[in-house]
Image (cartoon, grey):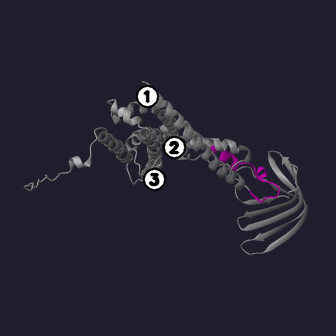
Amino acid sequence: MLFHSSLRRELSRTFGASLVVLVTIIMTMMLVRTLKQASRGSVNPQEIMLVLGYNVLGNLPTVMALCLFIAIVATLSRMYRDSEMVIWFASGNGLLGMVRPLLRFSWPVLLLIAGLALFAAPWTEGQRQSLRDRYEQRDDLERISPGQFQESADGSKVFFIDRDSTSDLGARNVFIATREPGRETVTSARSGEITTIGDTRYLLLSNGQRLETDSTTASKQVSEFETYGTRVGQALVRGSGQRALRTQATWELLLAPTPAALGELSWRVGLVLAACNFVLIGLAVVNINPRIGRAGNLLFAVFAFNLYYNLVNLGNNWIAGGEASFWAYTLLLHLGVFVGVGLWLLARHLQWSWRDFWPQRPRVELPRAAA
């Protein structure tokens, strides 16, 4: 049908434009956040673009759901404004007849949202966490940057070398502060050099002094040295432990239905169900009101999306904390919204009004005065 094809074409253009704009905004915000983390030493500066790509891909299901909602609301608002919906109604079709072309356009987007939310998002979160852990567990020597104080992997040492140190194996004006149980040590030297003895790496300092303080007695001991070697600890090896819930696959959450796992599962499933409901909500709420203006429907769409998204996040916290049941909250929220929007669409399709159900007073005709 020509009308259906033109509708899907306009929806595609609006959806694509909204997706480009929102992804650009998200990438800018994520880039600023990633650069801030890199400046603090939480992210490898050489992997900024990779971390940025994982962040954008992890937030893509939410962005696509919002773009789908905006595309439907904007397109239908334009059709109401240009009286195309009047022609649609005059041809004998009701509002429910618009559900079929909207679903024919939306089902590939909804399928992609489901794949990203249920499968791609946990994988990207795991990759991002792996990059962060690998960078935090790097060797102490790899942490040192000229002109900056840098903490070791286990937090027991603080290193500093002169900014003029350009060699990877040698350094000038070396400063090392070490904190051990019952003892604090400050070591400074004119130069230092990295050497490997066996499987262990050492930092050999030359022409320096060492200040050792006893924490219990507060006694101090100062010694000078021509050559002093200190072992540079390897990266802190973490136990395997339990992975974060956001990095676990969906089928793993189903096999271990703990409250925390069900809370994470409710967020993933809820995002997909919310995207499906947004198709019907967009059709139900769009109308032309001259008092509101053209942007009124879009403002309402953003407000409705924000409210629905916050309810999904609230359910995640309640289910994870054991304050709500997974099935009860999921059915109450998403099925309740589906039924409510369905009744709203039916009322608009049949042109019901609240006045039709309100008892009206019988008219009392006054007798006409005689001429």
- The residue wearing badge 3 is 317
Q: In the displayed structure, does residue 215 sit left or right of residue 252?
A: right
Residue 145 drawn in magenta = yes
Q: Amino acid at mark 3?
A: Asn
Residue 149 visible in the snapshot: yes
Q: Disc 1 on helix, strand or loop?
A: helix
Height in image: 253 above or below 222?
Answer: above
Q: Which mark is residue 62?
A: 2
Height in image: 160 above or below 90?
Answer: below
- Disc 1 from disc 2: Cα separation: 27 Å
- The residue wearing badge 1 is 4
x, y percentage for residue 158? 76, 60
Residue 247 drawn in magenta = no
**In the image, which is nearer the foreground, mark 3 or mark 2?**
2
Q: Residues within 10 Å of mark 2 (few under 14, many from 20)?
A: some
**In the image, which is nearer the foreground, mark 1 or mark 2?**
1
Quarter of the N terminus within the rendering: top left
**In the image, which is nearer the foreground, mark 3 or mark 1?**
1
Q: Which residues are magenta?
A: 128-151
x, y percentage for residue 210? 84, 66
Give 227 or 108, whichever is nearer the viewer.
108
Q: Disc 3 on helix, strand or loop?
A: helix
x, y percentage for residue 213? 78, 70
Q: Amino acid at mark 1?
A: His
Q: Which residue extends farthest left?
A: 370
What's the residue at 63%, 45% (across, down)?
A: 27
Q: In the displayed structure, does residue 360 sit left or right of residue 64?
A: left
- Disc 3 from disc 1: Cα separation: 41 Å
What's the residue at 56%, 44% (across, down)?
A: 59
